Amino acid sequence: MLVRSASMIAAIALVASPVLAQTSAEGTSSTPTPTAKPGKPPKPRKICRSEPTTTSRVRASICKTAEEWERDAAGSEHMAGVLGR
């Protein structure tokens, strides 16, 4: 009888604990938690382009930020000028 009463009390406590935790957490938090950290800048958007590969007939999809695409284009133009001399 004592074991049965102890198991019933444990079962009731197990079922009631999430409900009690949820109501106590709602009562203590007066301000909502932000989803993004205020000091962290957002990630730059990636731009994907499909480019041919030399080893396969399947085109490769290459994703970079706009800044990376501009930097690569400027580097390619520079190398074309150097090799063209």
Image (cartoon, grey):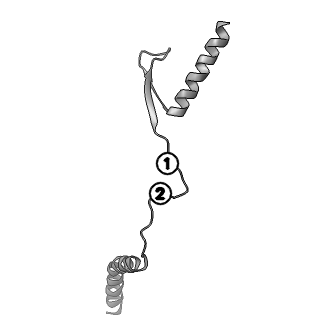
Which residue carries the number 1 mark?
42
Residue type at mark 2: give it. Answer: Ala
Q: Secondary structure at mark 2?
A: loop
At 36% from the left and 88% from the top, the residue drawn is: 6
The x and y percentages for residue 84 are 64, 7
Distance, label 1 to label 2, CA atoms, is: 9 Å
The x and y percentages for residue 48 are 44, 30
Quadrant (top left, top right, bottom left, bottom right) of the N terminus? bottom left
Residue furthest out toward the bottom: 2
Q: Secondary structure at mark 1?
A: loop
Residue type at mark 1: give it. Answer: Pro
Quadrant (top left, top right, bottom left, bottom right) of the C terminus? top right
- Residue 58, labelled with which disc? none
**Category of crowding for the residue at label 2, using alpha-carbon neighbours closer than 10 angstroms: few (below 14), some (14–19), many (at least 20):** few
- Say whether marks 1 and 2 touch (CB < 8 Å): yes
The number of discs equals 2
- Residue 36, labelled with which disc? 2
The x and y percentages for residue 25 are 41, 77
Where on the picture, by quarter, is residue 20?
bottom left
Q: Front-most of 52 and 19?
A: 52
In the displayed structure image, the side of residue 24 where residue 85 appears, left or right = right
Upstream in the sequence, badge 1 or badge 2?
2
